[in-house]
Amino acid sequence: MNFVYELLRAGTTQANSDSGAEVARKINDNFKKVQDKFADVDKLIKEGVAADVPIGDETTAGTVKSSKSENKITISGDGTMEVNSLNVMIMI
């Protein structure tokens, strides 16, 4: 399930950065890649084939884990996610 995202160019000037339209295209292309990968996994599961789905991170599409800790996400039995609590520090 490995695939490479098309990275966005965020340079220091307009000349070496992606335009707004290019950013939108790359984001849409990346979401389509993720959608296609999960469709493949879903098909394999429905066919009864074991699928090795990794824990997702910044560069890998995958599953998420539930946690009840502060600043983490809990996943309910119906698959919805909720933020447990946020620790916010205000600097004055």
Image (tube, rainbow, N blue to C red):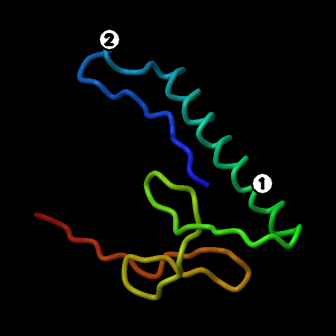
Determine contact: label 1, label 2, CB under 8 Å.
no
Question: Where residue 15 sits: x, y (%)?
Answer: 32, 11
Residue 9 placement, left or right of 91? right
Q: Residues within 10 Å of mark 1 (few under 14, many from 20)?
A: few
**For this rendering, which residue is in front, 66 or 60?**
60
What's the residue at 62%, 35% (across, down)?
28
The residue indicated by pointer 1 is: 39
Provide the secondary structure element on which disc 2 rests: helix
> What's the mark number on residue 15?
2
Q: Quick check: 57 above or below 76?
A: above
Residue 36 placement, left or right of 22? right
Provide the secondary structure element on which disc 1 rests: helix
Question: Where residue 56 sits: x, y (%)?
Answer: 51, 63
Q: Quick check: 51 above or below 31?
A: below
**For this rendering, which residue is in front, 46 or 84?**
46
Instruction: Tell me which corner region of the image, top left, top right, bottom left or bottom right, holds residue 26.
Output: top right
Task: Pick whichever of labels 1 and 2 is earlier in the sequence.
Answer: 2
What's the residue at 31%, 16% (across, down)?
16
What's the residue at 50%, 34% (across, down)?
6
Residue 7 placement, left or right of 37? left
How far is mark 1 from mark 2, CA to CA?
A: 37 Å
Tag 2: amino acid:
Ala
Question: Where residue 29 sits: x, y (%)?
Answer: 62, 34
Tag 1: amino acid:
Ala
Question: Where residue 19 sits: x, y (%)?
Answer: 45, 18
Residue sitting at the far front: 49
